[in-house]
Image (cartoon, helix red, strand yellow):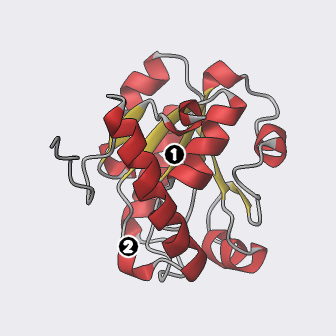
């Protein structure tokens, strides 16, 4: 079961992802979560930095799609001035909608970017995708269900750490061996 929570790469933010390396490796589709991945969940519209990042990715030849568990209205408002495909109520970690959004791309061409183990990492691994975990933009803005998920994540991270598997460098302290 832990295999569904092992990410492939960690970045402090989407701005720190090595896009050139991904493109050189044949990656062409970036599926990204919205809340606490691109912006804080309390930010309604894209920031100038997100506009610039999306322009850079598309200018490089990437296709970018938002795949969020938040409601369709939240995702629509956020993405109405973006020239990218965006989806709300994706039901991550279930993989069926993510597979649908990959139409025209192979697994080896696709990268999933997100901030949560229980939703983003799990759906990426269940779908067989390369997964980049990013530091959550603003934990204090998490919705109640996400706060609950983060408590479960701490237990998963402790198990990953115990087995010597990758864990994110933020927030969680190493397990002390007694």
Instruction: Name the one closer to the observer, 169 or 49.
Output: 169
What residue is at 73 percent from the left and 75 percent from the top? 71
Quadrant where the image shows the C terminus: top left
Q: Is residue 7 left or right of residue 127?
A: left
Residue 136 image point, x, y percent: 39, 62
What residue is at 38 percent from the left and 73 percent from the top? 139
Above-or-below relation of 87 to 138: above
Residue 113 tag number: 1
User: Can residue 13 be seen?
Assistant: yes
Q: Residue furthest top?
A: 25
Instruction: Name the one closer to the observer, 158 or 104.
Output: 158
Q: Quadrant of residue 110?
A: top right
Above-or-below relation of 130 to 115: above
Q: Is residue 41 left or right of residue 48?
A: right
Which SS class for mark 1? strand
What residue is at 66 percent from the left and 26 percent from the top? 128
Gap between marks 1 and 2, in whole Å? 17 Å
User: Can residue 166 be seen?
Assistant: no
Which SS class for mark 2? helix
Quadrant where the image shows the N terminus: top right
Q: Quadrant of residue 11?
A: top left
Mark 2 lies on residue = 139
Residue 128 tag number: none
Q: Is residue 1 left or right of residue 47?
A: right
Residue 133 image point, x, y percent: 43, 45
Q: Is residue 175 left or right of residue 42?
A: left
Residue 25 image point, x, y percent: 48, 16
- Neighbor class of circle 1 (other Cα within 10 Å; few <14, some 14-19, many 20+) is many
What residue is at 77 percent from the left and 48 percent from the top? 94
Residue 125 image point, x, y percent: 62, 33
Q: Nearer the N terminus, badge 1 or badge 2?
A: 1
- Neighbor class of circle 2 (other Cα within 10 Å; few <14, some 14-19, many 20+) is some
């Amino acid at each position: 079961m832990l295999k569904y929570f092992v990410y492939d790469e960690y970045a402090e933010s989407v701005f720190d992802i090595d896009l050139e390396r991904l493109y050189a490796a044949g990656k062409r589709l970036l599926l990204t979560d919205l809340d606490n991945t691109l912006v804080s969940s309390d930010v309604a519209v894209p920031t100038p930095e997100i506009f610039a990042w999306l322009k850079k990715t598309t200018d490089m030849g990437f296709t970018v799609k938002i795949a969020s568990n938040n409601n369709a209205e939240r995702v629509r408002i956020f993405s109405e001035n973006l020239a990218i495909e965006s989806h709300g109520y994706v039901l991550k970690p279930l993989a069926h909608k993510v597979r649908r959004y990959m139409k025209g791309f192979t697994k080896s061409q696709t990268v999933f970017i997100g901030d949560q183990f229980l939703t983003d990492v799990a759906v990426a691994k269940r779908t067989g995708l390369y997964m980049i975990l990013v530091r959550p933009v603003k934990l204090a803005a998490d919705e109640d269900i996400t706060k609950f998920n983060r408590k479960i994540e701490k237990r998963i991270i402790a198990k990953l750490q115990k087995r010597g598997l990758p864990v994110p460098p933020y927030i969680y302290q190493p397990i002390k061996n007694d």
